[in-house]
Amino acid sequence: MSGPLLSLRDLSVTYHTSSGPVPAVRGVTLDLARGESLGLAGESGCGKSTLAGAILRLLPEKTVIEGEIVLDGRSVPDLNPGGLRALRWTAGAIVFQGALHALNPVRRVGDQIAEPMLIHETVSSEREARQRTEGLLGRVGLLGARADSYPHQLSGGQRQRVLIAMALACDPLLLIADEPTTALDLMVQAQVLSLLDELQRERDLTLLFITHDLSVLTYACSRLAVMYAGRIVEVGPAWQTFEDGLHPYTRGLAAAFPTIGETSSRMRPSGLGGDPPTPGDLPPGCPFHPRCPLARPECRDAEPELRSSGENRVAACILV
Amino acid sequence: MHPGVSPLVEIEGLHVHFGDARAVDGASLRVMPGEVLALVGESGSGKTTLVRAIQGLQKPTAGTIRMEGKVQSIFHDPAVQMVFQDPTGALNPRQAVYEIVAEGLRIRGDKGDEVDLVKEALARAGLRPPERFFPLFPHEISGGQRQRVVIAGAMVMEPRLLLADEPVASLDASIRGEILALLRGLVDDHGLAILVVTHDLGLAWNIADRVAVMYLGRIVETGPTEEILDDPQHPYTRALLSVVPETREMEPQILKGEIPDLSRIPSGCRFHPRCPLLQSGTLPEDVAQRCLSDDPGPVPLGAASAAACWPAMATETSTPTTSD
């Protein structure tokens, strides 16, 4: 099948809470080509995890999804429960942050990896499921015998590998990794990133990688999308976007990760200052203007649309 | 390293064992007044146990910790204060900011003007005007402000040493810079020292005067930040630096596996089973043999820069390698 694997058109997601509607994602348009790795960056509350949840409809019941989500030719908002079950694990799977709560503490990890295979009948017997589970564990760098371990018997890095093996159980086309390395040590983080990179290449996976750590994304992804207050404010090639962002927000976020050896950042930590806005109470005009070092009076008037600037680069800022 | 200045904290030959597990296994380290020292290492390297020992929360199995020349006992010293990783977990959700900051003063039975002291501590932590924050509860302020409240609660005790365990790891990237700038400012403006525990080498580059690298309970390399991060001598430090995403010029040396079990510390050099330099096969036969059979020992206390690595010591003949 040609065309993008995932296509979002003017996607909006609104939570309905006791204190009123909260627009978490506000009009996102984005395509992921087959085999591509895209990084989605932004601070807590910018809507990046909501966006990921919407793609597989893993959001609370009363949440309203508007706009189009097409994954592998299927319109996700229109799927009935059966269609949704068929979509999850096979068309798209998520690797969550490797905290203990993503795994069931009282079940052996092998059974948890085998469960989606048996439900989706991608294997014909429990024996085959076990063989495949051991194969997957081997592929993510663990001993097959680890299938008999309980989550608490594994280290943080090992649990993250189990979660990756589980996400791969039914050979998904799209792998969504939501902060998969945030809780991990530097060296274990590097191991997990290089594992994801290898898997992406060898299985021709499409990867949507979500984190607030822009530097990790540039390492793991070819393209970068930056989100702020529910919208995408910049998209471009990963390294260019990290090193020379068009949007002042991208530049502020990138400055939080100093280049070691560069004298300009030695003893000079920098960042944006201020806090991201609350989704239910956005400032008028460009929602970034209260924190923007380059804000002008007209930034309060209207929210800028994404505009192209240079090859394959877009940004939503009147200065671009 | 700072002639004429006596260390604020001096840790000498510290051991903390839990049964067979040697969490700290002969660590020696100095923190000088008015400096930021970054203690870097993986989970399981013993960083947290070392910090708990400095706080007086963990009794050493052997070795000494001196605070301003006096041997630190198990009792808590108010001159040593702590900043935790997760401000949300560190703050009592049912206490207002004022109560949180004043608590330490009350426990100490402080006789000064509490309101003034709390006000000053909040202002020092960058929460201005301080009165505005008095009645607010942790859930009513942002993550960055919460970490500032934690810092104010430490600063109100007038510490001479601040122990910060991954102070920005759970914060958003954009807030990271301002909290690090605040910590650096406390050192520059108030002359206290900070021992910051982190696995974030970019943080060390941003605020630390010196770096100490810990592996399996010992300091394996120490020196000025520029020296350690520009030209690390220990292969472990080199590997850590090579996997920092921001240093893309370096070929990543991803070490296999995880840090070994603390109850089975390898013989010879404790890093040898994971050492890329040894595995490369480029070392002279006699040096490689030494890595397998002889322990290079901890870095000598008081050396300006040193690496506990046989190949590094063999090439660096100018650095004294004898223990003091």
Image (cartoon, rainbow, N blue to C red):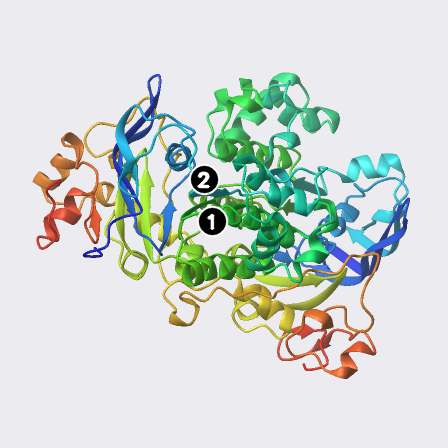
Q: Nearer the viewer, residue B52 or A112?
A: B52
Element type where label 1 sits in the image: loop
The image quarter in which residue A108 lies: top right
Q: Amino acid at mark 2?
A: Pro
Q: Chain of mark 2?
A: B
The C terminus of chain A - image quarter = bottom right
Mark carried by residue B158: 1
Sequence-wise, which precedes: disc 1 or disc 2? Answer: 2
Q: How many marks?
A: 2
Q: Is residue A218 above or below residue A145?
A: below
Q: Is residue A50 left or right of residue A160?
A: right
Q: Nearer the viewer, residue A278 or A104?
A: A278
Mark 1 is surrounded, within 10 Å at the Cα level, by few (under 14), some (14 to 19) or many (20 or more) other residues, namely: some
How far across and how far down the image is residue A315, in percent?
69, 73
Q: Is residue B217 left or right of residue A281?
A: left
Mark 2 is surrounded, within 10 Å at the Cα level, by few (under 14), some (14 to 19) or many (20 or more) other residues, namely: some
Residue A172 in sight from this viewpoint = no
Residue at screen point 52% across, 46% down: B154
Residue A189 in sight from this viewpoint = yes
Element type where label 2 sits in the image: loop
The image quarter in which residue B244 lies: bottom left
The N terminus of chain A - image quarter = bottom right
Residue at screen point 52% across, 37% down: B108
Q: Chain of mark 1?
A: B
**Residue assigned mark 2:** B78
Q: Is residue A36 above or below residue B262?
A: below
1 and 2 marks in contact (CB < 8 Å): yes
